[in-house]
Image (cartoon, rainbow, N blue to C red):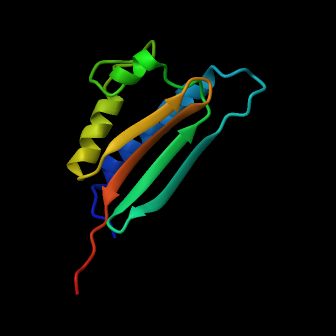
Amino acid sequence: AITVDDIQIEQVLLNLIRNSIDALIDLPQKTQRQIQIQTHMKSFNQIEIKLHDNGSGINEAQKEKIMTPFFTTKPSGMGMGLSISRSIIESHEGVLYFNSEPEKGTTFYFTLPVKRKIK
């Protein structure tokens, strides 16, 4: 069992999915667009949620700034989505991180603690 604010975690997932969709828009027309969402137990007391897309990826210069407030790669973005998402995950005692390879896609991961009853 995990104890979370459902609405806040939903907002994180929606933000990550929306970002993935935006990353897929510019792919060549005949390229299959993919978004994969997976969950698994990372350890005895953590679950990990993984969201991967096969978009264009995040370049090295963007990687350093992507989680900072007001930084955006989108023409109409505010640059707050990932910063707010990270704050939400951290307020749930989790961690939001990513890895990305140009032209191969990006994976965002976040962890949430598992609340276990001790007998």
Residue 33 lies, in percent from the top left, at 67, 34
Point out the residue furthest to the right here.
Answer: 30
Please tell me which residue lies in front, 94 or 17. 94
Tell me what residue is drawn at x 50 percent, y 31 percent: 100
Residue 47 lies, in percent from the top left, at 39, 60
Number of labels in the image equals 0
Residue 9 lies, in percent from the top left, at 34, 49
Q: Is residue 15 visible?
A: no
Point out the residue furthest to the top here.
Answer: 75
| Picture layout, residue 25 above or below residue 42 | above
Q: Quadrant of residue 5?
A: bottom left
Point out the residue furthest to the bottom here.
Answer: 119
Please tell me which residue lies in front, 55 or 101. 101
Tell me what residue is drawn at x 53 percent, y 53 percent: 38
| Picture layout, residue 29 above or below residue 99 | above
Q: Quadrant of residue 34?
A: top right
Tell me what residue is drawn at x 37 percent, y 42 percent: 12
Please tell me which residue lies in front, 17 or 113. 113
Q: Quadrant of residue 35?
A: top right
Residue 108 lies, in percent from the top left, at 45, 40
Q: Quadrant of the N terminus?
A: bottom left
Tell me what residue is drawn at x 49 percent, y 23 percent: 58
Q: In the picture provided, is 63 more to the left or to the right than 22?
A: left
Please tell me which residue lies in front, 74 or 110. 110
Q: Is residue 51 visible?
A: yes
Q: Quadrant of the C terminus?
A: bottom left
